[in-house]
Amino acid sequence: MVRSREKTTTGHYTLINGSSYPIEWVDRLIVEGTYPGSCSLWHYKYRGWNGTVESESGGERTTFVNYPGDYSSALVYSMGIVHKELTRLNWNKLPSSSKAGIIQILAELDDTIALFTLRFWKSLSYGSITWGVLPFVQDLQAVATTCRNLTANLAQFSYEDSYSVNIPSQPDAAPNTYGYRVLSGTCLVRKTGLGDISFHHPGSIALDRLGFHPDLATAWDLIPLSFLVDYLLPIGDYLESLRMGGWVKTMLFQGWVTSKFAIDCEYYNTQTGYIGLRAPYKMDVFRRFSMNDVLIADFTPPTQLFKVPNLKQLFNLLYVLVLNKRHA
């Protein structure tokens, strides 16, 4: 269900000839609910240049004030970027996904058994807790989730996901009557609805639930101290992206998609008398629409070549270096 709260603002809009007239626009706070919703909404607000524009379809139409004639080109460009990201599948949200890797559990079985020995607890330290006890607790949580998913419904299950899409800058349009360029922009995408993976082969679903992934990402996890390298270089993240989720890579989705754009633009007019006129403006767009499509897990490698470790990671690096130096 979609609920809204409105705040009405009044003011005056001044024309070039000096005359003015009162204007009124509505700031609408839209609160999202779960699928199925009540309606589709298209709500945008333009701010800058000669005034403010706000309009909404699927509901009450509000004030319409002067704005650049080709302003919509910036929105069309931004929507084209985001449209490619709408069918992105988050594999971790599926009832067949498992964080418990069966290969890793078997490979580290000796270390796991050592946790229950008296010798381990007598020599308890920061390192044994950080890389022994805590990972074991996380594995137990992952196994519990896996067991719960064994009886999960594979059709008509709730699916929610949200992510941000960066809109790259767009250079000046070809010289014509109107022009624009996108300086920067982001869009927050949120999906709420029902998923269906029941059409997949049972073997693929079983492999995902067991966490059986004999790939390079698993091999990297088994290399001692590889996580320290991941503090500085996104090798593990890159290998994980090659996996593209797991054995189940597609899902039928039916529900609502919400996209919230925040776009900074620059407009220029090459008409006679306005040659060289440039002015910044902003667009805030809220769009909510129904979607019935196939979501696909895609290859999205990390964009950063180097990572800056946080304080905890720096401490872990120093701890391992000091520990190795003592045993050298």
Image (spheres, grey):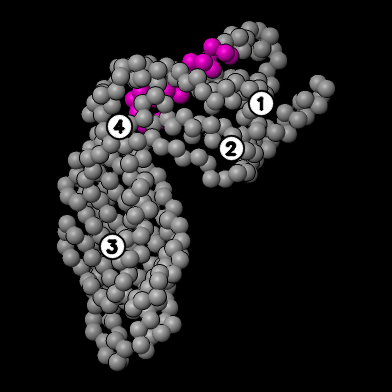
Q: Is residue 205 above or below residue 174?
A: above
Numbered disc 3: secondary structure: strand
- Counting the numbered discs, the total is 4
The residue tagged 3 is: 44
> Is residue 79 one of those drawn in magenta?
no
The amino acid pointed to by label 3 is: Tyr
Q: Cβ–Cβ below 8 Å for labels 2 and 1?
A: no
Position of residue 123 measured from the top left corner of the image (x, y, whole percent): 71, 15
Dot placed on the residue nearer the N-terminal end, 1 or 3: 3
Residue under the point 50% across and 40% down: 301
Which of marks 1 and 4 precedes in the sequence?
1
Of circles 2 and 1, the one toward us is 2
Residue shown at 32% from the left, 70% from the top: 71
Mark 1–mark 3 Cα distance, whole angstroms, equals 50 Å
- Is label 2 or label 3 in front? 2
- Give the numbered dot on residue 251: 4
Task: Give the alpha-carbon distance from disc 2 to disc 4, as whole Å.
Answer: 28 Å
In the rendered structure, which amino acid carries the disc numbered 2? Answer: Pro
Q: Circles 4 and 1: CB distance less than 8 Å?
A: no
Q: Residues within 10 Å of mark 3 (few under 14, many from 20)?
A: some
Mark 2, residue position:
234
Q: Nearer the viewer, residue 243 or 224?
A: 243
- The three-letter code of the residue at mark 4 reads Met
Q: Earlier in the sequence, mark 2 or mark 3?
A: 3
Residue in front for this viewpoint, 281 or 37: 281
Q: Which residue is mark 1?
A: 225
Name which residue type carries label 1.
Answer: Leu
